[in-house]
Every structure is written in structure tokens, then in C-alpha cells.
């Protein structure tokens, strides 16, 4: 079987499991009153989303686990050592565990928020300690199973960063995880963008004959699509930090697992714009004692305040991701980043 068949199987399983979990999870969360508390500082029209069930990330987390486990097992049962080597179980398992650790951090944050009936869960310090711990644990696992400290730096080529590789990589991972988290602010946005990111990484894994990561990426893409059935505008459920932090970890696992973290720059452009819009807004606000660059941040709220509806924002941001995905593929295929 080709990598395309395995990725199709993983995506299909993840899609079916994710969408089916939604049919049971949504009424359960409504029953136990696990509703989202909407921030006062957000767009006023978001108030009608108050008490929409959250923690919907459980849907694609379940789909991903099922898809990776079942498809990998089927692959291993081919009983071919060469095929198993191409699966690279340690890298995939390490990436999945890191994603789950971030999902667990998000779940704790969501649970505290729901229990206290406010939009604040863990403190920023608590989150950062837990997030950096998960990142360093993942990097240590990669090191144990053969990864080195060399990476591609544009215009410089392959550079050995030594000990600083781990510091820089941990900062990148935590930064991207939180950038993905910031992208979760309107119906269908984070799921759509991440679905395209996973799809492009899936193709690159297939071209590299890295079957395990091909399966993992396909599972993430399929799980996001299954979730979007319930999350697209008007959303019947939100992914919560449970889902957005899991996806952030998954995006990093795909990039680092394929040894292509540099492609987080073009392929993750939407995440980066969301993050830097907040950084610029806060910095400018403090420096000018109250002036703003954007009407509201993260930047998807700026477009909302400018009159764009949620569906238009999702389509445009997804289209940008798709275009940058094509650019990333070209950089990859022509060996610019490898």
C-alpha cells in the first residue's frame, strides 16, 4: 500500500470518530453545563455565544488517537521491517504525546474556567511552566532517538546550534502553541487553518516516505474536518483551550518531526499574524499611553470590527494558508529548506 492509502485511511478514521464523538459530546456538555464564558472585552455580538459548549477539542483528540493507533497497527501488521522503519514510531509517538500534554494543559485551563464561571483558568506563569516542560520533554525524546542540534537557517544553510538549539526550539514550540491558541476566536477559523497546515505537512511527509508522520498529519487534518461539522458558523461547540493547545502541539510535532521547523514561518503565517498583532497592539498601547494600531486583537477581531463576517474571515485566512502552503511545498521540493 502506498503512503496515500495509509493517509486516506487515517484521515477517514479520524474524521468519522471526531464527528461521531460530537454527536454525543455536545448534548453531554450542555447537560453538565460546560459552557463558554465570553470575554467582556471581545466584540459585543459574541455575547450571543455565551454558554455554547466548550472543550470540543476532545472530538479531534479522540479521532487522532484512534486514527494513529489503528492505521499504525495495520501498517505494522504488514510485517515488513523496512516498512516499520519508515513508520518511525518514536518520532510520531513523541509528537502525539506532546500534543496530548498540551491538550491536558488546555483541559485543566478550561475546567477551571468553567468551574469558576469566568474566562480565566490557569495563570500565565502556570501555563508557561507547563508548556515549556512539555516542549523540553519532547525535544529530549527526539534527541534520544537520534535527532541532532543542526537546523536550516535561511541564507546560512545547515547550522549546528549546539545547546542553544534546545532553548530556541522550546521558545519556538511554546510560541507557536500559543499562536495557534490565539487563532481560536471565531467559528471554524482554527480548525480550518490547521486542517490545511496538516494537509500540506501530510504531503511533504508522503514525499519524504515518512509514513508515520504521514499518518499523524492525515489524522489531524481528518479530525479537524470532523470537528468543523459542528464548529463551522454558527458553532454548536467550541474547541476550547483543550483543542487549541492540542492543535498547537500537533503543528509543532509535524514541523519538528519532519525536521522542517523553518516552514512554520510561511505555513503558519496566520498563526504568526495572530500572535504578533497582539504583541504589537499591547506594546504600542503601552508606549503611546492608550493608542491602538488595530481596532481589536487578535487580528481576526480587527477584521470583524471592520465589517467582515466570520465566514468571510475563515475563507480568507484559509486561502492565505493554502497559498503559503503551496509556497512551502515549492521550498521543500526544490530543497531550499532541506
Image (cartoon, rainbow, N blue to C red):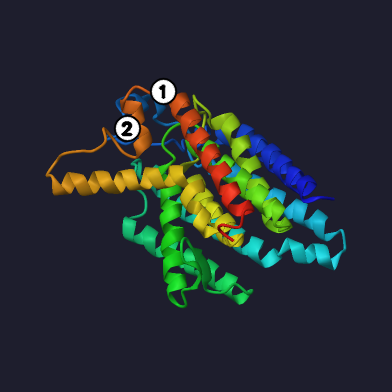
Q: Residue at horizontal 50%, vertical 40%?
A: 239
Q: Earlier in the sequence, mark 1 or mark 2?
A: 2
126 on left or right of 108: left
Quadrant of res 11: top right
Question: Local crowd at mark 1 within 10 Å, few (<14), some, or many (≥20)?
Answer: few
Q: Which residue is mark 1?
A: 309
Of 132 and 162, which appears nearest the observer? 162
Q: Residue at horizontal 71%, vertical 64%?
A: 88
210 on left or right of 42: right
316 on left or right of 120: right
Question: Against 242, is 306 above or below?
Answer: above
The circle on residue 302 is: 2
Question: Local crowd at mark 2 within 10 Å, few (<14), some, or many (≥20)?
Answer: some
Q: Residue at horizontal 81%, vertical 56%?
A: 75
Horizontal and vertical percent for residue 48? 38, 24
Of 69 and 304, which appears nearest the observer? 304
- Disc 1, SS: loop
Q: Residue furthest right?
A: 79
Horizontal and vertical percent for residue 202? 65, 49
Task: Estimate the spatial distance between the alpha carbons at disc 1 and disc 2, rounded to whole Å.
Answer: 11 Å
- Disc 2, SS: helix
Question: Against 55, is 235 above or below?
Answer: above
Q: Say whether residue 229 is visible.
A: yes
Q: Say whether residue 64 is visible.
A: no
Quadrant of res 171: bottom left
Q: Residue at horizontal 48%, vertical 69%?
A: 136
Amino acid at each position: 500500500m502506498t503512503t496515500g492509502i495509509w493517509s486516506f485511511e487515517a484521515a477517514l478514521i479520524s474524521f468519522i470518530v471526531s464527528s461521531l464523538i460530537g454527536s454525543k459530546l455536545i448534548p453531554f456538555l450542555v447537560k453538565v453545563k460546560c459552557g463558554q464564558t465570553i470575554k467582556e472585552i471581545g466584540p459585543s455580538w459574541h455575547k450571543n455565544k455565551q454558554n455554547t459548549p466548550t472543550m470540543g477539542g476532545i472530538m479531534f483528540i479522540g479521532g487522532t488517537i484512534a486514527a494513529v493507533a489503528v492505521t499504525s497497527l495495520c501498517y505494522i501488521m504488514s510485517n515488513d521491517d523496512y516498512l516499520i522503519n519508515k513508520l518511525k514510531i518514536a518520532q510520531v509517538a513523541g509528537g502525539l504525546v506532546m500534543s496530548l500534554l498540551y491538550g491536558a494543559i488546555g483541559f485543566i485551563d478550561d475546567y477551571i474556567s468553567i468551574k469558576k464561571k469566568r474566562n480565566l483558568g490557569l495563570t500565565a506563569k502556570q501555563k508557561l511552566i507547563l508548556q515549556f516542560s512539555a516542549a523540553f520533554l519532547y525535544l529530549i525524546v527526539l534527541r534520544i532517538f537520534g535527532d541532532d542540534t543542526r537546523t536550516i537557517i535561511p541564507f546560512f544553510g545547515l547550522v549546528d546550534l549546539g545547546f542553544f538549539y534546545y532553548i530556541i526550539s522550546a521558545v519556538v514550540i511554546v510560541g507557536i502553541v500559543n499562536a495557534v491558541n490565539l487563532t481560536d476566536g471565531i467559528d471554524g477559523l482554527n480548525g480550518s487553518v490547521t486542517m490545511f497546515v496538516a494537509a500540506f505537512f501530510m504531503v511533504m511527509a508522503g514525499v519524504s516516505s515518512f509514513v508515520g508522520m504521514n499518518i499523524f498529519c492525515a489524522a489531524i487534518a481528518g479530525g479537524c474536518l470532523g470537528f468543523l461539522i459542528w464548529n463551522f458558523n454558527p458553532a454548536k461547540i467550541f474547541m476550547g483551550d483543550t483543542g487549541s493547545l492540542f492543535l498547537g502541539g500537533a503543528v509543532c510535532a509535524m514541523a519538528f518531526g519532519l525536521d522542517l521547523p523553518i516552514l512554520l514561518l510561511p505555513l503558519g503565517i496566520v498563526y504568526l499574524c495572530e500572535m504578533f498583532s497582539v504583541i504589537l497592539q499591547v506594546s504600542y498601547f503601552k508606549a503611546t499611553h492608550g493608542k491602538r494600531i488595530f481596532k481589536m486583537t487578535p487580528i481576526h477581531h480587527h477584521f470583524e470590527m471592520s465589517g467582515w463576517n466570520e465566514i468571510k474571515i475563515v475563507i480568507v485566512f484559509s486561502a492565505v494558508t493554502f497559498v503559503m502552503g503551496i509556497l512551502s511545498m515549492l521550498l521543500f521540493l526544490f530543497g531550499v529548506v532541506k
